[in-house]
Image (cartoon, rainbow, N blue to C red):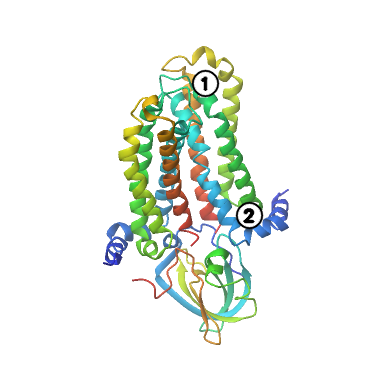
C-alpha cells in the first residue's frame, strides 16, 4: 500500500498551496514550531531530570510533572498544528526525505509513551515509582523527544 | 568607520572557511545550536513561568533556579560555543544581516535583565520568594525574560533565512 | 554584472523559488561558492538579444551533495553547463539549481532537500 496518495492530497491541498504562495507564511509558522519546541523540550527536560534524579530533587516527581504537564501540552499542540501546516506546504518533499519517516516514528512512540506510561508513572508517589522505573522512563522520554528533534533537523541535511 | 573588514577577516579565516565548506561539521554545529535551545532557553522558560506565577507556585523560585542552574549554564555554554562557531563561519553575512543584529540586541537585553535581577531582586530573593504570588518587579523580570528570549529565537530563525 | 544572493532569501524552497516558473539555461560558470548552508554557482547566460546576464543558482549543502557523489570539483569556473531549476520569487537573476548537465551529456542532481527539480513535481 503506497502512502503517496496521502502525501499528494496534503501537497495539493488549499492549505499547502496557500503557504507555498506566500513569501512569509512558512517562516512565521516555523517560528511557532520552534517556540513550541522550546516549551515541549524545556518541560520534558525538567521532568526527566527529576525522574533521572539529576535535578529538582527537592520536589516529588508528581508535583514537577503535574506543574509542567500543561506546558508540555501547549508545546505539543503548537508543534502538531504548525507541523501539519509546514507538512502540507512540502508534503512531497517529506515523502521523498529519508529522515522524515524517522521523525514521525519517534513522534508516534513519544506520544504513545507520554499519554500512557509517562502519565501513569509520574502520578505515583516517589517511593512507588522506584529508582529503576524512574530512570528508565526519564531516559526513554529524552531519547524519544530528542529523537524527534534530531530527525527533524536531519530533514534539511539528508 | 565600518567593522565589515574585521568580520570578513573572521569569515575568511582558515577555521571559518573550513566550517563553512565542511561536509558534516556545519550541520552538526547547527543541530547542537537548535536542539541546545531545549536545555538553555527551555529551562529559562520554566523559571520564568515560575516568576510570572504560572507553574510550581508552591515552590520558591530561588529553589528552582538553584537546582537547575548547573544544567542551564551547561546549556548556554553549548549555545555560545555552537553559536560562536557558526558566526565564525559566516561573520560578514551576520554583520550585514538585520535579523542577526536584532538577535544580538535581544540577547543583550536578556543578559542585562538577568544581571539586573541578580544584582537587585536576586540578592533579597530569600525574603520575598516564599509567596505564591511574587512581587511585581519579579514578575516583570519574568515577562521581560520571556519576551526577550522569544525575540532571540525568532530573530535567530529569521537570520537563517537571510544568510542563504 | 554579477548577481548576488537574494537579500531576503528564505530557507524554504517554496517561499523563495516559484515552482510555476521553471528555467533552463546554459552558459559559462563564472564563480562557485561550495559552502554551507547552500552551494551557489554563478553562470553567464546569453539571452536572445545576445546580452549576457550573470545568474546565481542555489543547490544543496556540500554534505548532501557529497552523499550523492558530487564533490566540489564537479562544477568549476570556466565550464559550460546547462542548469535547470526554478526562478526566484523576487524576480532577481537567481534560481534554484536542481540539475546541472555537462557538455558530454552527464548530469547531476544538485538540489537541496527542499528543492524540486522541474520534473520531480508529482
Q: Secondary structure at mark 2?
A: loop
Q: In the rendering, which numbered label is found on residue A61?
A: none
Q: Which residue is label 2 attached to?
A: B90
Q: Is residue C2 above or below residue A149?
A: below
Residue C120 appears in which quarter of the rendering?
Answer: bottom left
Residue B139 % position (x, y): 46, 23
Residue A133 % position (x, y): 40, 35
Q: Which is more foreground, mark 2 or mark 1?
A: 1
Letter of the chain that mark 2 sits on in the rendering = B
Mark 2 and mark 1 in contact? Answer it, CB < 8 Å: no
Residue drawn at x 56%, y 43% is B102
Q: Is residue B25 in sight in this rendering?
A: yes
Q: Which residue is label 1 attached to?
A: B62
Residue drawn at x 52%, y 21% is B62
Q: Is residue A75 above or below residue C41?
A: above
Q: Is residue C58 in sight in this rendering?
A: no
The first of marks 2 and 1 along the sequence is 1
- Spatial CA span between label 2 and label 1: 39 Å
The quadrant the N terminus of chain A occupies is bottom left
Letter of the chain that mark 1 sits on in the rendering = B
Amino acid at each position: 500500500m503506497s502512502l503517496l496518495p496521502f502525501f499528494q492530497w496534503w501537497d495539493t491541498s488549499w492549505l499547502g498551496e496557500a503557504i507555498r504562495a506566500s513569501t512569509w507564511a512558512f517562516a512565521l509558522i516555523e517560528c511557532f514550531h520552534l517556540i513550541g519546541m522550546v516549551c515541549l523540550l524545556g518541560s520534558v527536560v525538567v521532568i526527566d531530570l527529576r525522574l533521572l534524579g539529576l535535578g529538582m530533587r527537592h520536589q516529588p516527581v508528581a508535583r514537577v510533572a503535574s506543574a509542567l504537564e500543561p506546558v508540555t501540552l501547549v508545546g505539543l499542540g503548537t508543534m502538531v498544528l504548525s507541523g501539519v501546516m509546514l507538512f502540507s506546504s512540502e508534503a512531497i518533499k517529506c515523502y521523498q526525505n529519508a529522515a522524515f519517516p524517522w521523525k514521525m516514528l519517534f513522534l508516534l512512540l513519544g506520544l504513545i509513551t507520554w499519554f500512557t506510561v509517562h502519565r501513569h508513572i509520574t502520578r505515583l508517589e516517589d517511593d512507588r515509582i522506584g529508582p529503576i522505573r524512574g530512570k528508565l522512563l526519564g531516559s526513554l522520554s529524552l531519547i524519544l523527544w530528542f529523537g524527534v528533534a534530531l530527525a527533524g533537523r536531519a530533514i534539511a541535511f539528508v | 568607520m565600518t567593522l565589515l573588514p574585521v568580520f570578513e577577516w573572521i569569515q575568511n579565516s582558515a577555521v571559518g572557511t573550513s566550517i563553512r565548506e565542511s561536509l558534516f561539521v556545519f550541520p552538526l554545529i547547527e543541530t547542537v545550536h537548535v536542539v541546545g535551545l531545549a536545555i538553555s532557553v527551555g529551562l529559562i522558560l520554566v523559571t520564568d513561568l515560575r516568576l510570572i506565577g504560572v507553574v510550581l507556585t508552591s515552590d520558591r523560585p530561588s529553589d528552582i533556579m538553584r537546582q537547575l542552574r548547573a544544567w542551564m549554564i551547561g546549556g548556554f555554554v553549548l549555545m555560545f560555543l555552537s553559536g560562536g562557531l557558526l558566526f565564525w563561519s559566516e561573520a560578514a553575512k551576520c554583520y550585514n544581516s538585520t535579523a542577526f543584529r536584532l538577535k544580538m540586541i535581544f540577547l543583550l537585553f536578556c543578559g542585562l535583565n538577568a544581571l539586573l535581577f541578580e544584582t537587585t531582586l536576586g540578592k533579597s530573593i530569600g525574603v520575598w520568594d516564599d509567596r505564591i504570588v511574587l512581587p511585581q518587579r519579579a514578575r516583570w523580570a519574568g515577562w521581560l525574560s520571556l519576551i526577550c528570549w522569544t525575540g532571540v529565537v525568532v530573530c535567530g530563525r529569521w537570520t537563517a533565512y537571510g544568510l542563504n | 554584472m554579477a548577481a548576488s544572493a537574494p537579500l531576503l532569501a528564505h530557507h524554504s524552497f517554496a517561499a523563495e523559488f516559484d515552482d510555476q516558473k521553471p528555467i533552463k539555461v546554459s552558459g559559462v560558470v563564472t564563480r562557485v561558492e561550495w559552502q554551507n548552508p547552500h552551494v551557489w554557482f554563478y553562470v553567464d547566460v546569453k539571452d536572445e538579444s545576445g546580452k549576457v546576464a550573470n545568474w546565481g543558482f542555489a543547490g544543496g549543502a556540500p554534505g548532501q551533495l557529497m552523499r550523492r557523489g558530487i564533490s566540489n570539483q564537479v562544477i568549476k569556473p570556466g565550464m559550460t553547463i546547462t542548469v535547470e531549476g526554478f526562478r526566484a520569487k523576487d524576480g532577481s537573476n537567481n534560481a534554484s539549481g536542481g540539475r546541472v548537465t555537462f557538455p558530454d551529456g552527464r548530469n547531476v542532481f544538485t538540489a537541496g532537500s527542499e528543492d524540486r527539480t522541474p520534473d520531480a513535481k508529482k
